[in-house]
Amino acid sequence: MEKFVREVSDIEETIEKYSDLIYRTSFLILKNKADVDDVVQETFYKYMTTDMDFGNENHKRAWLITVSQNKCKDLLRSQKIRSYVTYDEIEERYSDDEDVEKKDIEEYVELANLSYKNKSVFMLYYFEEYSIEEVANILGISVSATEKRLQRAREKVKRAYEKNSKGGEKSYEVR
């Protein structure tokens, strides 16, 4: 068993500060609460057992997001998850969160049907407000690949929005 190399107070503070962020970003990708709980736990376990020195909070935040994204990718690869989440399940998860409005929930649902590659870029750029260069660095891809994925994601979200605003019925399939 690995030993924790960080102080308990640092671990508690980091979990308190970043658990919601890691949960939200992972949920957008995995769409399954149990899998997301595992990813969050594994991400913070890795944080507790690494002796990496983070120069500042931005570096720590980016590292945690990168680790969680990699854990999500590993899980998707190993289990070939292809599930969908109902609107009610997402609404239930976020209904107690005063910071999240119904419009935000609908955006999450729309994002849930983007491919992993496009969703991760879109989420980091718009929701976490990283620059294109920072997103490229976090995901380990080129700036041009980041820009292209962001363009594709925007197009799919736009099509989903246009489709939903015409028919009145909420259908979030944008593949």
Image: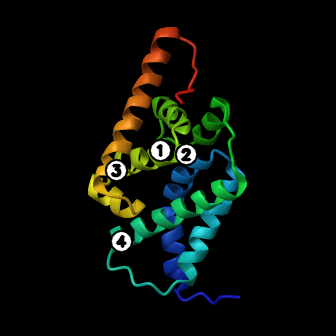
Q: Position of residue 22 (x, y in %)?
A: 52, 58
**Residue that badge 2 annotates:** 28
Splitting the image into 4 quarters, where does residue 87 fall? Answer: top right
Compute the Cα span from label 4 to label 2. 22 Å
Query: In the structure shown, which secondary structural element does the residue marked by tag 4 occupy?
Result: helix
In space, the residues marked 2 and 1 are separated at their CA atoms by 8 Å
For disc 3, the marked residue is 146
Q: Is residue 172 above or below residue 39?
A: above
Residue at (52, 86) in percent of width and height: 6
| Residue at left offset 63%, top offset 90% | 3
x and y percentages locating residue 53 in the rendered image: 40, 84
Q: Which mark is residue 119?
A: 1
Determine contact: label 2, label 1, CB under 8 Å.
yes
Disc 4: CA contacts within 10 A as few (<14), some (14-19) or many (>=20): few
Disc 4 marks which residue? Answer: 59
Nearest to the observer: residue 106 or residue 140: 140
Dot 4 amino acid type: His
- Disc 2 residue type? Leu
* Residue type, label 1: Lys
